Amino acid sequence: MFDDLQLPIEFTAAGDTPEEQKTNLKIVKPSPGFEPASELVVEIILKDANVTVMDFSAQKVVTRFQIDGMWHAGAPMERETGDYILATLKQLAGLDYRERRQRQEGQFSTLYRKQKQKFKVVSQGIQTGERVAIYLDYKRPPLDKALDLGMRERMLDQLRPILNDQNTGMVLVSGLPGEGYTTAWRGVLDACDRLTRDYFVMEEKGKLEPEVINIYPVEFDPSQGETAMTPIPQLLLKEPDVLAFTDLTGGELINDIIDLSNNKKIPIFTRIPGKHCVDALLRVLLLKPDVKKFAESLTCVLSMRLIRLLCNNCRIPYQPHPTLLQKLGLPGGRIAELYKPMVYQPGMVDENDIEIEPCSECAGIGYRGRTGLFEMLTINDDLRRAIVKTPQANKISALAKHQGHISLQMEGIVMVAAGRTSVEELQRVLKS
């Protein structure tokens, strides 16, 4: 499928010593599974698939690749070929290739295109056969900068004063777990002025978030009867400027941290899962805090979703129908074209009836990478009254829109108009 599959790839097999690593590699190189296993590993790298799953049944092997949060089917594979590949991968990862029922886990690494990759292989017997998961890890540093995450500079300029100039109040951050929930939190913390203010974040023992420079974690242990408020009396002796709470566990905690903010004149940052700003806000209300207290304390809600970017190498321009532009709220006279993905299918031919190869940049998927789609809702007195009196999504959203709030959908439409993503991808993200 890919010409690049023939490019050389170097393996470093599992082993406690260089001699063991060389022995494991020497064992698999002559095997009939080494070449197809090498091709699969290169395909994983080219597709940038962070997880690849192989499901073994009696007759066949079904392969799926998780790429930018979406699952894509691999080419059909006969059981015999799959067995050879699996035996090779297990040997490379230091596993027993004969064991097909018990859970096994191992690692190997590669060098491809002058870049190092690390793979983890996990195998487990299941009712229908065996399931193998292959995890690709480039050891990329976590993204921290809000601009790198995709936040528009104008929004960041509006957010920074809220983060850095307040003496009380609550900033609420939201996202979907596994879809940027932690990343959005890190982006907000990084946007803070951590050189002139001291930030402390309450984190449950065993659930520590990746470190953000100059944000000081404070652990509490629920197994010892501790809560997020347990370290506060001792922490107040250090005169913190800002306190952050990674989890809202109930209305009582929310009331406690609001009282803390008001009494000690300390701003509070916290987060909750949510699809968008209004959804996050209403999820807090489901925890049954004192609604009036919460509404008076809340100053800003920031939400992030992840959206796939069109591959710049193969995206297809098209002239949108005026009805589509009208639905999107885009001016017809100013938008000459939008873009859609070029999704590769085996057997595709061009106008000269020559078979088309998949795009070398996106491996024929049509998208390459993801970025953050951000929404920021600044809370004013009208919205506070609505939260208390009519806490309904449609009414709060309508009021916010009337006041000029730019919704997640509107932010996405800007990306569509700029050719960075497609209408279909925006619809998928907003529906999920």
Image: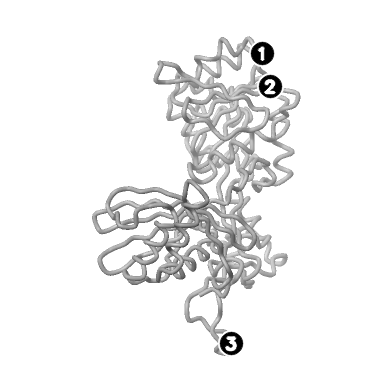
Secondary structure, mark 1, is: loop
Which label is found at residue 293?
Answer: none
Q: Identify residue type, mark 3.
A: Glu
Q: Nearer the viewer, residue 141 or 271?
A: 141
Residue at image position (28%, 53%) is 125
Read off the residue under disc 1.
Answer: 239
Residue denoted by label 3: 351
Label 3 vs 2, first from the N-terminus: 2
Single out the mark in the foreground, 3 or 1: 1
Is the image coloured rainbow, by chain, by secondary structure, or in one colour?
one colour
Between residue 271 and residue 251, name the one nearer to us: 271
- Mark in front: 3 vs 2: 2
Left or right of 348: which side holds 400? right
**Mark with earlier residue (3, 1):** 1
Question: In the image, 147: left or right of 67?
Answer: right
Q: Which residue is drawn at 60% across and 17% down?
A: 261
Judged from the image, the secondary structure of the residue bearing numbered disc 2 is: loop
Dot 2 or dot 1, earlier in sequence: 2
Nearest the viewer among 229 and 152 is 229
Disc 2 crowd rating (10 Å Cα; few below 14, some 14-19, many 20+) is some
